[in-house]
Amino acid sequence: MAVDTKESKIENAPRSIATPDLSDALARLAARARLGVVEVRGRGRGAGSGIVWSSDGRIVTNHHVVVGTGGRPNVYFDDGRTLPGQMVAENPALDLAVLQLEVTDLQAIPVGDSTRLRVGDLVFAVGHPWGHRYVLTAGIVSGLGRTAALRGGRQSDYIRSDVPLAPGNSGGPLLNAAGEVVGINSMIFGGDLSVAVPSHVALDWLATAGTQAYLGVGVRPVRFNVRTPVGQGALQGALVVTLDPSGPASQAGIRLGDALLAVSGQPVGDTKSLKRALSLGTANGTIEVTLLREGQEVQVDVPVVRRD
């Protein structure tokens, strides 16, 4: 005869996935994201969201958030500050825009690799839906692919998710489980699915939009054979073949013949990957460069200089 004990009821009861560790991780993710998410407003217009892309005052948002503001919206921070913004780059087809603020102490959100997203991955949005500030919503990636650009005729990659969005979320970040920006939320599709511009699309555009940092180097691809714990391996880098003597790289001690291995934590192996890395957020007004010199890895902090 089966015995219905209290212990058997507990053992067979559904287990909650909201463990204390998971709840704590989500709370910490939301707290960190608040520092790098802003509210973007124009006079007499509704508000949208924006992402602190770098500590030296670059904000990435949707183009439709700043249309009609004369390119000069106000930007509101979690700490109570309000700063005027100046639009310095725009792409209506991708629905992206870059604002520049006169400030150097912002907390940027790290940018993740959206090409590694999978359908079913957990994602989060932070924004200001219906004027309610710093609302965190969650969901999963529902689809990935290419379609007509969000506002234009050409093809572009997109991320579709079931993360709840509303007016005021536009321009805010879509975050992965590590709290990294993997998309810029742009629109609601079909009433219940959200569409975001992948971070790799934003990075590729920013690398050509005239807003990336300037090093003052010319490079060409180079490969090295290096000894690893399991034998010989190949290492790719970008060999410095020209150097602006008055540029920030030269001033920081980078030399001709150095091989750049990583910039802002991103591997570099040619001009394109270098430009993409330079379009990422910077930390404390400097760019961290890892290079190979005379067989030794060296890290150099280069002051941020931008060329519009």
Image (spheres, grey):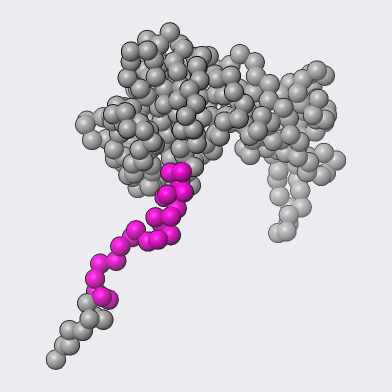
Query: For the view shown, which residue lies furthest in the bottom direction?
Result: 1
Tell me: residue 163, above or below residue 44: below
The image quarter in which residue 225 lies: top right
The quarter in which the C terminus is drawn is top right
Residue at x 39%, y 15% (from the top left corner): 42
Tell me: residue 153, above or below residue 33: above
Q: Depth check: 243 or 71 in front? A: 71
Q: Depth check: 253 or 83 in front? A: 83
Range of residues picked out in magenta: 10-31
The quarter in which the N terminus is drawn is bottom left
Residue at x 58%, y 16% (from the top left corner): 210
Tell me: residue 260, above or below residue 40: below
Q: Is residue 83 magenta?
A: no
Residue at x 41%, y 56% (from the top left corner): 22
Q: Is residue 182 visible?
A: no
Q: Position of residue 136 (x, y in %)?
A: 36, 41
Q: Position of residue 291 (x, y in %)?
A: 75, 38
Q: Is residue 41 visible?
A: yes
What predominant SS class does the magenta segment belong to?
helix
Q: Depth check: 201 or 111 in front? A: 111
How many badges with numbers are in the image?
A: 0
Q: Position of residue 37 (x, y in %)?
A: 46, 32
Horizontally, residue 85 falls left or right of residue 168, namely right
Tell me: residue 193, above or below residue 208: below
The image quarter in which residue 20 lies: bottom left
The image quarter in which residue 154 lies: top left
Q: Is residue 17 magenta?
A: yes
Residue at x 72%, y 27% (from the top left corner): 303
